[in-house]
Image (cartoon, rainbow, N blue to C red):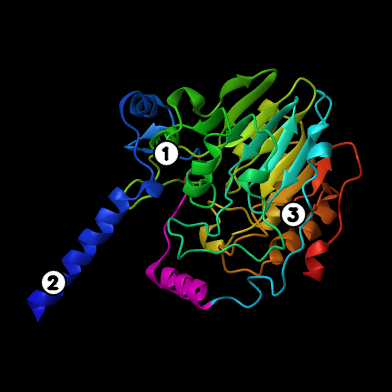
Amino acid sequence: MAFISVSLLLLLILAVVAFVNLSPQFGTNATGDRLKRIQASPNYKDGKFQNLVPTSLDMSPGKLVSATWKMLTGVPGSEPADTIQTVPFDAALFEGTGGPEQVAISWFGHSSLLIRIQGKTLLTDPVFSERASFASFSGPKRFPYNHYMDVEELPKVDAVILSHDHYDHLDYETFIRLKSKVERFFVPLGVGAHLEKWGIAPEQITELDWHESAKLGDLTLVCAPARHFSGRGLTNRNSTLWASWALLGTQKRVYYGGDTGYYPGLKAVGEKYGPFDVALLECGAYNEDWIDIHMMPEQTAQAQLDVKADLLIPIHWGKFNLALHTWRDPIQRLLKRSAELGTKVATPRIGEVVVLGATVPNTHWWETE
């Protein structure tokens, strides 16, 4: 019996390893020139990328078991009881903002946004699949919307920008459908290896280290630091870089924060690349046990001041259940603290186009869902 048990365990391990190595959605590790650039980065030490400040990813065994059990059994109110009513995307309004003095933004839940700046349309961290997962049959399932934005409905996209390679930001199925519709992809170091494995030509991919920049017409895209981590497989944690992005037009500036814990580097971004007309900052999927890698909502409110943003659009909430809080908690806590700080926050519905300089949407739509 012992022999049979050990043999079955070994077969299970081999099956898992084979699945990870053979399934394309896991991506691949950088090699050749990509690997050389990684190894030459000042942010890469001891065989992995490092945060600018000490950052813990460890949880005690007891806390890990407790958190896992709560995620599996569910937290009351962690998902909406009713279908979230979205707003049809107004492509004419969005694409009509082509001047250097104009910015338009549409949010599709979590961290997927369309940004119109300097006459260019950028798509951030697109995840249009049913789950934020490596598998179509398991993992966090998206909340019920009456309509989901999909690749086929997108306007002309000039470029995709990625913050890092986690599944809730980099989705294999979405990119398979995107690769024939987008000409440029701007990513942190190492992430380009995943895209190239999925059939995107290397000349379409621009990989950047922190504080490196690239041009898209008159628009400058700066790969800025963040406090987070990366990895898609069993053994490649922190083998690719994570980042935020400063989008610098000739008249307007947008900051996309990606995933980040709160840290002094946010003020440094504001000093170096701000002030920003709008910041798109995460406010969900937080917990005190992983506070180093995801901001609490009150920290998000402060981060708006740190990066010197006139307006905040909170993201990384409203689509996936990735933590132990209720689905409304992120926005409620954020707005409470923002009111205390006297800062300006927009709360658009999913799909709604926000045009800077026009009326800022601030309805509490989540209270009716």
Mark 1: give few (<14), some (14-19) or many (20+) Cα within 10 Å.
some
- Which three-letter amino acid code belongs to the residue tagged 2? Val
Range drawn in magenta: 53-73
Q: Residue furthest bottom?
A: 1
**Residue 67 position in % (x across, y down):** 48, 70
On the picture, is 321 further left or further right than 33? right
Mark 3: give few (<14), some (14-19) or many (20+) Cα within 10 Å.
many
Residue placed most toward the observer, 295 or 70: 70
**Residue 292 position in % (x across, y down):** 53, 52
Q: Of circles 3 and 1, which is in front?
A: 1
Q: Which residue is mark 3?
A: 350
Which image quadrant: the N terminus?
Answer: bottom left
Q: How many marks?
A: 3
Residue 309 visible in image: no
Picture residue at 54% right of the left edge, 31% below the top: 185
Q: Which residue is mark 2?
A: 6
Picture residue at 49% right of the left edge, 48% below the top: 173
Q: Which residue is mark 1?
A: 198
On the picture, is 107 further left or further right than 166? right
Within the image, what quadrant is residue 266 found in? top right
- Which three-letter amino acid code belongs to the residue tagged 1? Trp
- Which three-letter amino acid code belongs to the residue tagged 3? Ile
Q: Residue furthest right?
A: 359
